[in-house]
């Protein structure tokens, strides 16, 4: 079974990609940024504000597929500045229960100006 995930509670894709896919027992959430689902504009100026909005977007996509943050097993975080790691991490840990998902974090330039963080997630919803 393979099906696309789409919800208006998360921002629409700004390029040729889907918000997410369910493939069997796995849900793949595309890299999300701090875009407000209503306006499509970046929400927040700080890494804390942007991380919160980004994770809210991931949460909405997961919920649209019948999953939640407890189902996430792997996360990739991209930051524009390594000094953002600690404040991002403080917000991040409020969204995931222990045991935390496996995670990779690295720094890179992001597509949208003023975007400080992008996060993608993989969830497992099998038995």
Image (cartoon, grey):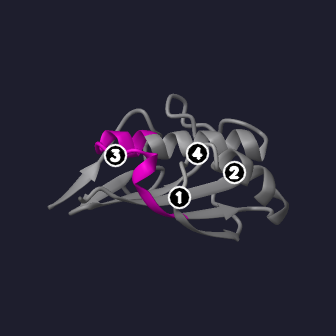
Number of the label disc, if any, that sits on residue 34: none
Q: Mark 3 vs mark 1: which is more N-terminal?
A: 3
Give SS at disc 3.
Answer: loop
Determine the CA span between mark 4 and mark 2.
10 Å
Disc 4 target residue: 54
Q: Is residue 71 magenta?
A: yes
| Vertical relation: 41 (above or below) 72 | above
Determine the CA span between mark 1 and mark 4.
21 Å
Give SS at disc 1.
Answer: loop
Given residues 26 and 94, the one toward you in this image is 94
**Highlighted range, magenta:** 60-75
Answer yes or no: do the residues labelled 2 and 1 have beta carbons within 8 Å? no
Answer yes or no: do the residues labelled 3 and 1 have beta carbons within 8 Å? no
Report crowding for label 1: few under 14, some 14 to 19, many 20 or more residues within 10 A (C-alpha). few
Q: Residue at x 65, y 64 (%)?
A: 78
Number of the label disc, if any, that sits on residue 67: 3
| Vertical relation: 50 (above or below) 127 | above
Determine the CA span between mark 3 and mark 2.
27 Å
Which of the two marks, 1 or 4, is nearer to us in this view? 1
Seen in the image, is 91 located left or right of residue 97? right
């Amino acid at each position: 079974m393979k099906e696309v995930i789409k919800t208006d509670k998360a921002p629409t894709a700004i390029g040729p990609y889907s918000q997410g896919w369910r493939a069997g027992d796995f849900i793949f959430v595309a890299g999300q940024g701090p875009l407000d689902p209503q306006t499509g504009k970046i929400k927040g100026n700080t890494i804390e504000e942007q991380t919160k909005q980004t994770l809210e977007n991931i949460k909405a996509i997961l919920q649209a597929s019948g999953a939640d943050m407890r189902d996430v097993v792997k996360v990739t975080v991209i930051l524009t500045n390594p000094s953002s790691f600690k404040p991002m991490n403080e917000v991040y840990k409020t969204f995931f229960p222990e045991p935390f998902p496996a995670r990779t974090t690295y720094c890179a330039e992001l597509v949208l100006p003023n975007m400080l963080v992008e996060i993608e997630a993989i969830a497992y919803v099998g038995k």
